[in-house]
Amino acid sequence: MKNLVGAFRTLTMLPVPGPDGGSGASGLPWFPLVGAVLGLAGWGLAAGLLRPGTLACGPLGCLLVGALVVVLWAWLTRGLHLDGLADLADGLGGGWTRERVLEIMKDSHVGSFGVLALVGGLMVKTAAAGVLCASGDLFWLGVAPVMARWAMVAQACFHPYARPGQGTAADLVRQAGPAHLLGASALALLLLAGMTLQGGWSRLPGVLGVVILMTGLTGVTTRRRIGGVTGDVLGATCELAETSVLVAAALL
């Protein structure tokens, strides 16, 4: 139980009661469940606002509801993953050596590449969520956070920690192993099976393929540029995977 509590406290601002302990990677198998709670919150918000006969059911209304879901996710996660996306974009865009990329990523200021990544990412995510709200396929709002948290686990298990010494997510990445990925994968598949009972099975393989591809490309790129992953890379992976699910579900 303490591993589950640790996962929620690491990834969200939710006031989860209970003891927090265990190794840095011990909470990894529970990451998809944290995503499911976030997804159900977004799904529930959209379902509550998109009632028949309300203005929210129009095209612009659906876009507004999609924006509110995205804002809710950012608030519940304290903007942690968005910060990682901005830092990674600044580092890769402004640094030419491994040391310089890591130095830029550690800087608390947001540069032009980070702003572009944040604005572009939020716009695309909001638009995709709005399309799904308009189509009525709200269950994808539950699927996206689950797959995004699974992608974080996969990234931590497949790549080494990029920084020497200690740092954000150092213990989590260094202690991550196949057992953590297996546990997270089994839990994610179970959650996805329940969420896609409304008819999403036909599109699910394609959506999963897009997420796996995006996660793989992110991991390969950061391993080539900085030698592995960091906490910022995991956060960026979450954002990119979440957006990929929404876009793929909206377009496939």
Image (spheres, rainbow, N blue to C red):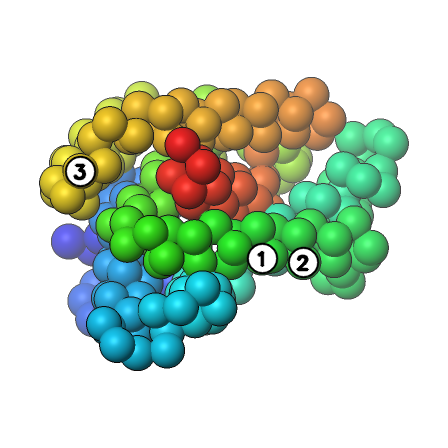
Residue placed under numbered mark 3 in the picture:
199
Spatial distance from mark 3 to mark 2, Cα to Cα? 32 Å
Residue 196 vs residue 166, the one in the foreground: 196
Residue 41 vs residue 22, the one in the foreground: 41
Kind of residue indicated by mark 2: Val
The vertical placement of 39 against 16, above or below, is above
Q: Identify the element where label 1 is drawn.
A: helix
The vertical placement of 71 against 55, above or below, is above
The location of residue 151, given as percent across then percent down, is 41, 35
Task: Describe residue 60's horizontal placement relative to residue 43 as left or right.
Answer: right
The extreme bottom residue here reads 54
- For residue 169, say whether it is visible: no
Determine crowd level at label 3: few under 14, some 14-19, many 20+ residues with C-alpha closer than 10 A. few
Which mark is in front, 1 or 3?
A: 3
- Looking at marks 1 and 3 on the same chain, the residue that comes earlier in the sequence is marked by 1
Kind of residue indicated by mark 3: Gly
Residue placed under numbered mark 2 in the picture:
119
Rendered residue at 52%/29% (across/down): 214
Residue 8 vs residue 200, the one in the foreground: 200
Q: Identify the element where label 3 is drawn.
A: loop
Disc number placed over residue 122 in the picture, else none: 1
Kind of residue indicated by mark 1: Leu
Determine crowd level at label 2: few under 14, some 14-19, many 20+ residues with C-alpha closer than 10 A. few
The location of residue 165, given as percent across then percent down, is 62, 39
- Looking at marks 3 and 2 on the same chain, the residue that comes earlier in the sequence is marked by 2
Residue 214 vs residue 137, the one in the foreground: 137
The vertical placement of 149 against 134, above or below, is above
The location of residue 76, given as percent across then percent down, is 40, 68
- For residue 182, say whether it is visible: yes
* Quadrant in which residue 208 is drawn: top left
Which mark is in front, 3 or 2?
A: 3
